[in-house]
Image (cartoon, rainbow, N blue to C red):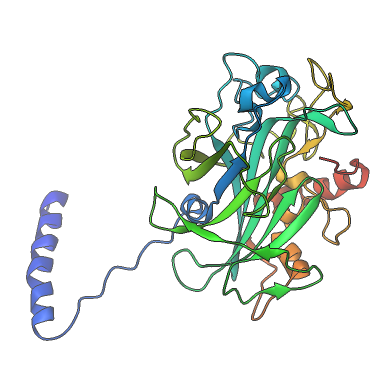
Amino acid sequence: MPDRFRTAGRSLAAAVLVPALVAVGLAAPAPASAAVSRAELALRWAPIHYQDVDATGSHALGGRSDYITGVDFDGDLSGRNNWDSAGQSGASFAAQAYYSVLETSTHWYITYLFFHPRDWTDHPFFETEHENDGEGIMVAVERDGSDYGVLRGAVSVAHSDFYSYTPAGSTWTGGRENVDGTLQMQSSPHDSYPHPVTAQEAQGHGLKAYPQYNINGDGIVYYPSTVAETPSNGNDRDVRYKLVDIFASGGLWAQRANANLFANLGTFAGDNSGDCGVGTYSCSTNSANAPWGWDDGNDLPGRGEIATDSAKLVAEYFTIPGSLSRAYTYNPYASAAAALREAAKTAPPVVD
């Protein structure tokens, strides 16, 4: 029998059977929902992101230096021309953020990277600037049997320091590190879910939970999405950003050995060409990091483990009731675990 006739027959049978079951007080079981994809999970818990914008000074590019974008915003995968490219007419500031998802039997760990072509300053005294800037946040989600789980905690990256947060009602409390504040939730006009709210400062782009950083004057509110919008100006309060999988084919993780993009494992390549450092204290080189290069040197977890071994990090940062599996069922970073440990031995201190 042709498939189309089989399908029609099944549909007819269902149409007759379901009313009959309802009539006798029975309910036909709803089909089991398929597990959500990692992309859907990342979109569900992606932050609503407040970006402060400073338009003053030549290095601000009228505020564009504070816009988030992709590492290939200038059409290539070289890290050493991004400072200059940001000031050119062909540069794209379509909003993107990168994510990676790790899985255990008890939790999901989702890391988000927000990239800027410049970390900049507008005064000459005792502050440096540098090409490229990568900071972000890792959120920990308990697998409670629901499609998207329940958000329990988060750790953000502000330069070379980590800050930990829990949302209201979380069962997690402080561990070796004190909880630094409450992770607020906010509804998005672009979907039906509440999202955690993060914020980045202008210029240096340290990232914390809102309102520990906030918009002061001009700023952009970015909303997670599957499309990349470009801000209309430096005071645009509704811009959608596109989520890009770090583990995608040819993506950021696949480029980790690209010497044009990375100076070493986890550190973006950046030089002091153009006017970086002009009129300021200095311009440092190779000073921005991808998630597998993030480090808080004062804390116990190793370099990059906020992203590559998130279960280890949350076990140190938080007191967690119930079970916490440390065995990953999905962790593509693990394929380079030995290389990451070796790189951490010789990598310079993180000074973003």
Q: Quadrant of residue 159?
A: top right
Q: Position of residue 80 (x, y in %)?
A: 76, 22
Q: Quadrant of residue 203?
A: top right
Q: Position of residue 45 (x, y in %)?
A: 52, 56
Q: Quadrant of the C terminus?
A: top right
Could you tell me if residue 157 is visible in this image?
yes
Q: Nearer the viewer, residue 102 or 128?
A: 128
Could you tell me if residue 247 is visible in this image?
no
Q: Nearer the viewer, residue 287 or 64?
A: 64
Image point (66%, 74%), residue name: 172
Image point (57%, 61%), residue name: 184
Report the number of discs. Answer: 0
133 horizontally vs 234: left or right: right
Image point (75%, 63%), residue name: 313
Image point (64%, 30%), residue name: 71
Q: Position of residue 74 (x, y in %)?
A: 61, 20
142 horizontally vs 80: left or right: left
Q: Nearer the viewer, residue 117 or 265?
A: 117
Q: Single out the residue that lies furthest toward the bottom.
A: 24
Q: Position of residue 108 (x, y in %)?
A: 59, 62
